[in-house]
Amino acid sequence: MRYVIRRLAQTMFVVVVVTFITAVALRFLPGGNDVIVGLKAGPGATPEQANAVIKELGLDKSIPSQYFTWVKNFISGDWGLTFHTNERVADAVKRAVPVSAYLMVYAQVFALALAVPTAVWSAYKQNSRFDRLATTSAFGMLSVPNFIVAPVLVLLFSVQRKWIPFPSTYRSLWDSPVEHFKAFILPTFTIAIPLYAGYMRVLRADMINTLQSDFITTARAKGVGTPALLFKHALRPSLFSIVTSAAVQIGALMGGVVIVEGFFSLNGMGMLTVESIFAHEYPTVQYCVVILALIYVFTNFFVDLAYAWIDPRVRASRTLG
Amino acid sequence: MSPQQAASARDLVQASSRQIEGPLLEVTDLHTHFRTDRGLVRAVDGVSFSLQRGRSLGIVGESGSGKTVLSRSIMGLLPKRNTERSGSVYFEGREIIDLPMAERRRIWGREMSMIFQDPMTSLNPVMRIGKQIGEGLRLHLGMSKEDARATALHLLRDVRIPEPEKRLDQYAFELSGGMRQRVMIALAMACGPTLLFADEPTTALDVTVQAQILDLINVQRRERNMSLILVTHDLGVVAGHTDEIMVMYGGRMVEKAPTRVLFANMKMPYTEALLNSIPKIEDPSHTRLNVIPGRPPDLVNPPKGCRFAPRCSFAQDRCITEEPPLMTAEHPEHVYACWYPVGSPSHRARSAELAANAGAR
């Protein structure tokens, strides 16, 4: 318990730092307030209009009070309007987050569900034909970039076979599940292929190490059968690297798959962030960055908890230390 | 099925009831070879012996003499890949050398089990002690979770671990080395095996707890009427703890005798050299340690004659060209493989010569 509280305190500290930097970042834009006024109120704004903009964004206040107002607005959901379209920023982000979240969850589940059994069996049957096939194909999957994989998948399943419409439109899971999955299946594959390959290789390497440990021989000498040996004894101590890399991927997938999102016209966080940057929609960029940062920070927090679950020694040493 | 067949089938099922006559374990001409890039490593090269119920046997030899491989290949624990095993291992009245994996697993833990060398690494680091001990009980004896836990507690008491209730829910890293080895013993004894292997059980432990662990193994062995095979490089360890001793060199058995007979009348110069390499308490300080010169033989190309000949101070021409067979000494259970055993005229003459040389220097 003390371990959890410590980790949580550290996490909160990072959260404060991240939000602070993003909140006051508006002050350090090239061109200063004039540019912001120009973007928001249009060229040739009157001094009154300019003052109103500056006031709205809190640029007239001291840095701490600007920060606190910003945090208050962030929590209350009052994120202001976009510069150009006068849409509420919160609405734009709210539309993008679930798209990215679905994509991330599907890709992760798919990649992990495939990688864990493959890696375990590969490690157990090291250098077997199965293992060689698995490692070589994983190497191949890692080396093909997603902007190649995506069009190939479309060619195979939408053009030649016409199984999946392209481009398909995003539908929510609850409204029409079938359309929803049709929209997500190809982008999920595209992302999951290299993910799977990475996870497979990482877990396989750790499993091979673990399977050489003395305690595995002990378990064998007890008469433990192969499935129990692999999944009850060997898998858990081998999870460190794969948990770490899967956690890093959560953040990366939420905001970093712009090419895939763009190709399949899924308007997720990655597209929103990039488009906002090009359009100089600074508040939208701010909120996207903060949300991605928070996702990173909290995944890291949960990863630390996962380490403690995986290995009791972590619990002991980190509470003492 | 005839009545006799039915009866023998029942006997097989009840093998663990331990009512079968004859020796518990009979190993005949066991070979274990490993295929490597350098060639075939003959780690165990034709070993035969038998072990009676409730008796204990010490297997002694240097590192690389094949003693660990021998114990593991009797149990069948070695990975199949790149291993060639031949010969016969007769255990509890049946041949077990080529049992299928599923049946071998039924023996492991239940009828034979093993205590390993390093208690630091031999316990699962992420599984609670109680669960590790209980696993075999649930697997082999079909115990419920609660019963397995209660039995594990019993076992921890038997191996004299302080505060056993608390240990059940602890992890290996929370225990000292000696305690971990006690846990290993509890784990190995859990299902009441008839044969217990202990592979260098005290080598990784503090000297102060070594004797305690050996005594514990022995007490438990007597109480549970287990047979014990104790593998060690230390003649001193087996001296007080086993009924018989077998000395291995280069994958072969070179001498075997009841413990008392061996120490009173050892025949192999190698056994003698092993004994002499143990420092004696009555030696004045700074006495040079007696070492056996040279290195253990290359098991890919073992020497043609006696495998110990290249390092033996007493070797003669015949030792290099002709391999000595196992010969029986005065005591009927004492066998050795040497052309010029300790106490023979030529051995005595050479001893005198060596002593004279040492004196002259």
Image (spheres, rainbow, N blue to C red):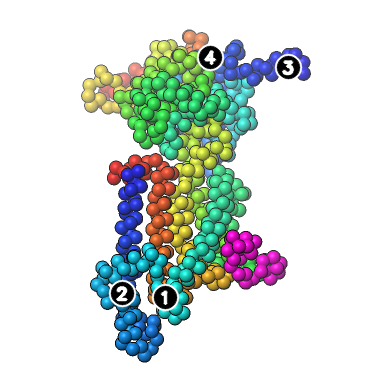
Badge nearest the viewer, 1 or 4? 1
Residue that badge 4 annotates: B52
* Residue B93 appears left or right of B249: right
Give the CA separation, mark 1 to mark 4: 89 Å
Q: Residue at x 66, y 69 (%)?
A: A165
The foreground one among A146 and A48 is A48
Q: What x and y, as percent, mark residue B252? A: 51, 26
Element marked by disc 4? loop
Q: Quadrant of the N terminus of chain A?
A: top left
Q: How many marks?
A: 4
Q: Write down the chain letter for disc 1.
A: A
Residue that badge 2 annotates: A58
Q: Can residue A311 be seen?
A: yes
Say above or below: A293 vs A283: above
Badge nearest the viewer, 2 or 3? 2
Which contiguous range is marked in magenta?
Answer: A158-184
Give the CA separation, mark 2 to mark 4: 91 Å
Q: Quadrant of the C terminus of chain A?
A: top left
Quarter-of-image position of residue B230: top left
Say above or below: B6 vs A231: above
